[in-house]
Image (cartoon, helix red, strand yellow):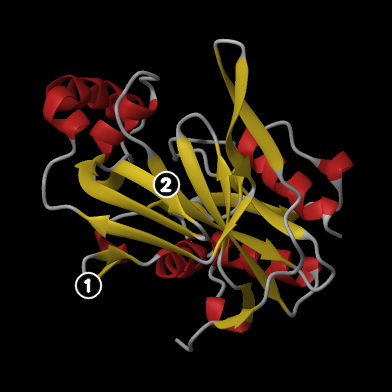
Amino acid sequence: MGSPQSIGPLSDCNQDQRYITIGEKDFIMETYPRFVRSVELSVSDQPHPYHEENSDIALKAWEEEVAKKPSLFNGLVMLDSAMNYQDDILEGTSHLVPYSTFLHWLQNPEGEGSHLFALGLIISKEGLPIVGRMADHTFNAGKCYSPSGSLDADDIVDGKIDLLANVERELGEETGLDLANAEIEAGFHMFKTNRNSIAVARCKFDLTAPEICAQINAFIASDPDAELSAVFAIEGKQNYDDNMSEYMVEILDWHFDQM
């Protein structure tokens, strides 16, 4: 597989400031979307504190989930214990935990830790985003996202997480597209939810939206275990799907605001 190309950012971010009130004073917390030149996550060989405290109850809850969807797999994924912005660099510490622990953490708003994942936003020649619908056998069946997935051991290079390698892998597994054929914006645009930090990489292909969709849908049809059931182009804010998450809507809004 060839090396992906990099290009400069398409344009400056439209940024939204969030505030926290202490007493009678408002303090600016963080600004999103936030451009970072790089994300540097070191992988700790120590167990994540949340896993140490909740592994047994998490495994019991996992067994109930598997009873409903037997295809689920309790592999190892990354859960972060620290994250900090240093100018245009995001630094953090990650730990490998069973997916059962991660899922339990995700459903526990008071759980210690944070979760960062990369999202490859597929962009057609016309500038249209391509979004996929998750297949029925997946945990998030019916939900609509761009290709993404939790970071895992396959993304570790010399003790650190390689986010672009994760984007390349997820894109290939879910859509069959080769990231070597795309122009990738330099750096990442960070979005934030209460539980997740999303590192967005815009990946522009020299194909029209119908061409990309046809290619991916043919790939999906050839794989009985495909993670997606179909993909489709988003032609504007009026075409959003009701099954999109709030963060996916924010990402698409940001993209269309720059067109």
Whether 138 is drawn above or below 21: the answer is below
Instruction: State which tag comes first along the sequence, 2 or 1.
Output: 2
- Between the residue at mark 2 and the residue at mark 1, the CA separation in whole angstroms equals 19 Å
Q: Residue 3 location in percent, x, y? A: 48, 86
In the picture, measured across the screen, residue 128 lies left or right of residue 156, that is: right
In the picture, measured across the screen, residue 86 lies left or right of residue 70, that is: right
In the picture, measured across the screen, residue 14 lies left or right of residue 27, that is: right
Task: Report the quarter where the C terminus lies.
Answer: bottom right
Q: What element carries label 1?
A: loop
Label placed on residue 116: 2
In the picture, measured across the screen, residue 3 lies left or right of residue 221, that is: left
Q: How crowded is mark 2: few (under 14 residues within 10 Å), some or many (20 or more)?
A: many
Whether 5 is drawn above or below 33: the answer is below
Q: Residue 43 location in percent, x, y? A: 22, 56
Q: Residue furthest top?
A: 23
Task: Give the residue at mark 1.
Answer: 158
Q: Quadrant of residue 247?
A: top right
Q: What type is the residue that disc 2 sits on?
A: Leu
Q: In the image shown, does 136 or 245 lie closer to the viewer?
A: 245
